[in-house]
């Protein structure tokens, strides 16, 4: 086991990693920008190092500063969390070159899965079903237009290095193609420094279902059920739950087995998630693989009674997984609401500032992952996530009832948050009945 882990991240995920390390008896090092000096992850780590000013490019996104902090403090491993450098192959290589273990898959695996066209090719070879589309990078818009005519509209253009909904455009006919291609390519170049595009058939009204995987270095891998991630705004997830109301045991086994087989064939190690689109006929198609822990991992932990962060650290330290698929028992239902510092009534405008009052809900089946507290100042420089509110129940109905209660108890004053939005969401008849898909929030206005 590692002696000391540096957490190359901030906010609630940094605190979550610190807690896992403490339970494993591993010392921790927090890194922080000048803007995050009062964050809880800084307070609860064994050591803390300021790595630069508020700007991410000069702190959390600067691999040299993070490696230097690890070397100065004697950390023998780095956990990247999610976001920032978590899926940066060059950073993973720098860790290895410095004799520091990167808690995650190999740099080569990160690189291959980070390239959406290459990831699709690998999954095809591994027998994972994929959405019809280009076999690799489009050479130009003319090639894309020809392929779109062949597979039929609508199609979706995607940046090969994309993520978070950037560099994506839905095209409904040939007249729209050239303009959307140029716009998507320009956005991809600006966001990722890579203008390469690929194309897929656009699946109408799909569900977004993801399978959580855990694999060790010895060829052992398991899936820990699925997560329903269809409640999205501009491709950004707002609420997740496990299990999905449209996935039965037979479909779960099928999706899980395909995901494990795919992970084993590509030699994957650590925590990972394969994301699928599920159509109305329950056909599922590979979308992408995330080579890190997910924001929404708590709902899986609640229904599987498994600590994914500790498992992730253990397998990175060279330990065997320690359990098999037969040992995984999924029970109950869990829901996660992302509480962001945003004004849901003003087009989700960011709302940084000082939290005047902060009351966290409690009681049976309630979990809150947060780095915030009363009089903490939400900085304007980073992701607006303030807290993740997770509820668990024996049934979806009980988990929803507890979420309704917990949202009422969750008081955050001084800034605007998405708590009012979530109250409206979970009260909507279509959400309660499970009648929704990724286009739900495009059709239903919950901001008024």
Image: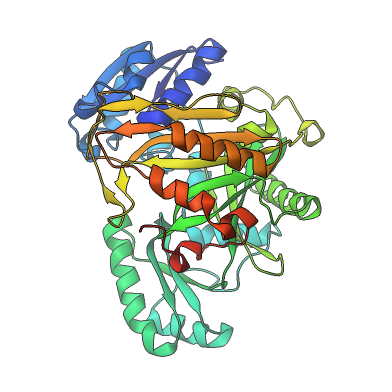
- Residue 332 or residue 13, whichever sits in front: 332
Residue 268 placement (x, y as % from top left): 61, 42
Placement of the N terminus among the 4 image quadrants: top right
On the question of residue 66 being in view, the answer is yes
Residue 188 placement (x, y as % from top left): 33, 62
- Residue 389 or residue 185, whichever sits in front: 389
- 271 lies left or right of 178: right
- Residue 295 or residue 392, whichever sits in front: 392
Give the residue at x 41% y 27%.
Answer: 14
- Residue 364 or residue 252, whichever sits in front: 364
Residue lying farthest to the left in this orientation? 53
The mark tally for this picture is: 0
Give the residue at x 38% y 14%.
Answer: 44
- 174 lies left or right of 195: right
Q: Is residue 197 above or below residue 266?
A: below
On the question of residue 293 being in view, the answer is no
Give the residue at x 17% y 31%.
Answer: 53
Looking at the rendering, which quadrant does residue 187 occupy? bottom left
Residue 327 placement (x, y as % from top left): 79, 30
Q: Is residue 158 above or below residue 38?
A: below
Residue 167 placement (x, y as % from top left): 37, 64
Scheme of colours in the image? rainbow
Looking at the rendering, which quadrant does residue 433 occupy? bottom right
Placement of the C terminus among the 4 image quadrants: bottom left
Looking at the rendering, which quadrant does residue 373 occupy? top left
């Amino acid at each position: 086991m590692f002696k000391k882990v540096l957490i190359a991240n901030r906010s609630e995920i940094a605190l979550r990693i610190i807690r896992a390390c403490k339970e494993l008896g591993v010392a921790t090092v927090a890194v922080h920008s000048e803007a995050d000096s009062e964050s809880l992850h800084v307070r609860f780590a064994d050591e803390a190092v300021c790595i630069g000013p508020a700007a991410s490019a000069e702190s959390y996104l600067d691999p040299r500063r993070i490696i230097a902090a690890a070397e100065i403090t004697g950390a023998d491993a780095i956990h990247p969390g999610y976001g920032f450098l978590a899926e940066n192959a060059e950073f993973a290589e720098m860790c290895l070159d410095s004799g520091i273990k990167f808690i995650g898959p190999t740099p080569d695996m990160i690189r291959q899965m980070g390239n959406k066209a290459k990831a699709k090719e690998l999954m095809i070879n591994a027998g994972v079903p994929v959405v019809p589309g280009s076999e690799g990078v489009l050479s130009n818009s003319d090639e894309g237009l020809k392929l779109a005519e062949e597979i039929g509209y609508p199609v979706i253009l995607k940046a090969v290095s994309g993520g978070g909904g950037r560099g994506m455009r839905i095209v409904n006919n040939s007249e729209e193609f050239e303009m959307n291609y140029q716009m998507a390519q320009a956005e991809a170049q600006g966001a990722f420094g890579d203008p390469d595009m690929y194309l897929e058939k656009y699946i109408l009204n799909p569900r977004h279902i993801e399978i959580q995987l855990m694999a060790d270095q010895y060829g052992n891998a398991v899936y820990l059920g699925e997560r329903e991630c269809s409640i999205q705004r501009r491709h950004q997830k707002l609420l997740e739950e496990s299990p999905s109301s449209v996935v039965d045991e037979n479909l779960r086994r099928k999706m899980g087995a395909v995901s494990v087989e795919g992970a084993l064939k590509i030699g994957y190690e650590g925590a990972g998630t394969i994301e699928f689109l599920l159509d109305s006929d329950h056909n599922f198609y590979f979308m992408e693989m995330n080579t890190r822990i997910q924001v929404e991992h708590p709902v899986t932990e609640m229904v599987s009674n498994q600590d994914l962060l500790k498992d992730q650290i253990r397998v990175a330290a060279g330990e065997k997984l320690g359990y098999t698929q037969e040992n995984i028992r999924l029970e109950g239902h869990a829901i996660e609401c992302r509480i962001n510092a945003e004004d849901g009534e003003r087009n989700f405008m960011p709302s940084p500032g000082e939290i005047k009052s902060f009351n966290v809900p409690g009681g049976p089946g309630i979990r809150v992952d947060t780095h915030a507290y009363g009089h903490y100042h939400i900085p304007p420089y980073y992701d607006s996530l303030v807290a993740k509110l997770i509820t668990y129940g024996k049934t979806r109905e009980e988990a929803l009832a507890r979420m309704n209660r917990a949202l009422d108890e969750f008081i955050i004053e001084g800034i605007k948050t998405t708590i009012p939005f979530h109250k409206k969401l979970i009260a909507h008849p279509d959400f309660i009945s499970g009648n929704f898909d990724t286009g739900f929030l495009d059709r239903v206005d919950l901001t008024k």
